[in-house]
Each structure stands twice: as structure tokens, then as C-alpha cells.
């Protein structure tokens, strides 16, 4: 905005009298002096928070990503307010998932409410994706990809059509476990 101006940019924020501040702008892209930049930064921190690592893992989902507000820390994954106590009388939240794992050139489509425990018992090379759903969704996926099924198992041949389905489920998700943690956190937050 000020690149072509020969003169140094000055702050345009009006003072009490309605006249521009006039102090030298800290950057030619923004017509704000250092004092007014500090005011904007403070306001942004209070309004939208500051992304940072949580001081400890979120008790609801286990994430270490947080947003710091002046009043409190909030989990960046599930939005659980740090310091709020989970009701210990309630069982952990249940989130059923259909999982897609790869072992060599095969893909397993299964379901569980505890993927960490279940997948720890299965040989696999990669966790490809999670899809929210129970046995009904799993059954639909088995029918959808029936022509790829290996014998009467939950293992399927890895083909472009199955890979495309998995890619759609994983779109925008770098880590399926982070998505699962978010679902757990959402379930815990809904439960209160």
C-alpha cells in the first residue's frame, strides 16, 4: 500500500481529537505505529486467542495443542476448557469408528469403539482413515466393496476405487488419530 510513497508512512489511528496519530508506522504495509500495533495484538489475543502448546495434555482427548485466552486455556482439538474436571462417575465417551488399515497390498475395513486397543492387536503397516460409524456402517462398506473382498474376511484388495473412497474420508486430515481424538473430545464436551 505504501510501497510507491516516497515519504515514510505514518499511523492513521485517530487520537481523542479525531486527528491521525502521525507517529511513524512500524511497517510500510500497515499504517500503524508501534503503540497501536501493541493494542491490536492485545485485542486479538483476547478475542481470538493465541495458539500454543497446552501446559499439560487435554484430559478429554489427550491433545497438546491449545489456544490461550486471558481467562483460560482451551484445547485446540476438542475445545475442552483446561481446568474443568471430567465427571469421574461417567464412563469414558464412546465413539464407534470404522477403521481402514493397510497391510502390504490389502486393506482391512473393521469397526471398534476402542481403536488403539483393537489396532494394537492387528498387523498393519498404516492407519489410513477413520469413519464415524458402528457395525451398520461397517456392513455397508463391506457390501459396497464386496467384489474386492478376500475370501470371507474383513480384508479387501487395494484397488483405485477403494483407495479413492479412503482418500475422500481422509481429505484434509493429516493424522487419523487427531480426528479420532477430536471426536472423543466432542463426545466428552457434549456429555458435560
Image: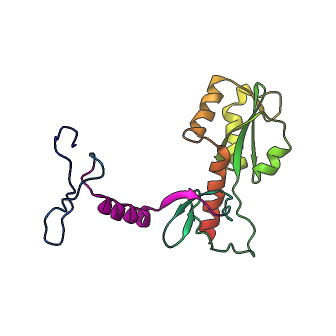
The residue under the point 16% across, 61% down is 20
The answer to which image quadrant residue 160 occupies is top right
The answer to which image quadrant residue 90 occupies is bottom right
- Position of the N terminus, as image quadrant, is top left
| Percent x, y of residue 127 | 72, 39
Q: Is residue 35 left or right of residue 5?
A: right
| Percent x, y of residue 123 | 84, 36
Q: Relative to 118, say whether 88 is above or below.
A: below
- Position of the C terminus, as image quadrant, is bottom right
The residue under the point 59% across, 60% down is 78
Q: How many marks?
A: 0
Colouring convention used in this rendered image of the protein: rainbow
Instruction: Name the one closer to the observer, 149 or 85.
Output: 85
| Percent x, y of residue 53 | 60, 57
Q: Is residue 47 left or right of residue 92?
A: left
Magenta includes 51? yes
The answer to which image quadrant residue 64 occupies is bottom right
The residue under the point 63% across, 62% down is 187
Q: Which range of residues does the magenta coloring cover?
A: 30-55
Amino acid at each position: 500500500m505504501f510501497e510507491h510513497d516516497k515519504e515514510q508512512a505514518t499511523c492513521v489511528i485517530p487520537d481523542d481529537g479525531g486527528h491521525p496519530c502521525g507517529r511513524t508506522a512500524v511497517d510500510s504495509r500497515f499504517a500503524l505505529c508501534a503503540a497501536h500495533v501493541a493494542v491490536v495484538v492485545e485485542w486479538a489475543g483476547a478475542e481470538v486467542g493465541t495458539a500454543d502448546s497446552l501446559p499439560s495434555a487435554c484430559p478429554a482427548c489427550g491433545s497438546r495443542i491449545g489456544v490461550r485466552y486471558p481467562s483460560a486455556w482451551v484445547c485446540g482439538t476438542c475445545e475442552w476448557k483446561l481446568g474443568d474436571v471430567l465427571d469421574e462417575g461417567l464412563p469414558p465417551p464412546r465413539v464407534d469408528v470404522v477403521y481402514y488399515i493397510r497391510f502390504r497390498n490389502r486393506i482391512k475395513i473393521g469397526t471398534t469403539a476402542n481403536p488403539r486397543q483393537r489396532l494394537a492387536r492387528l498387523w498393519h503397516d498404516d492407519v489410513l482413515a477413520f469413519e464415524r460409524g458402528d457395525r451398520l456402517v461397517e456392513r455397508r462398506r463391506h457390501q459396497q466393496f464386496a467384489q474386492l473382498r478376500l475370501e470371507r474376511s474383513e480384508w479387501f484388495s487395494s484397488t483405485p476405487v477403494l483407495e479413492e473412497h479412503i482418500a475422500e474420508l481422509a481429505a484434509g486430515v493429516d493424522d487419523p488419530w487427531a480426528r479420532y481424538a477430536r471426536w472423543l473430545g466432542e463426545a466428552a464436551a457434549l456429555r458435560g
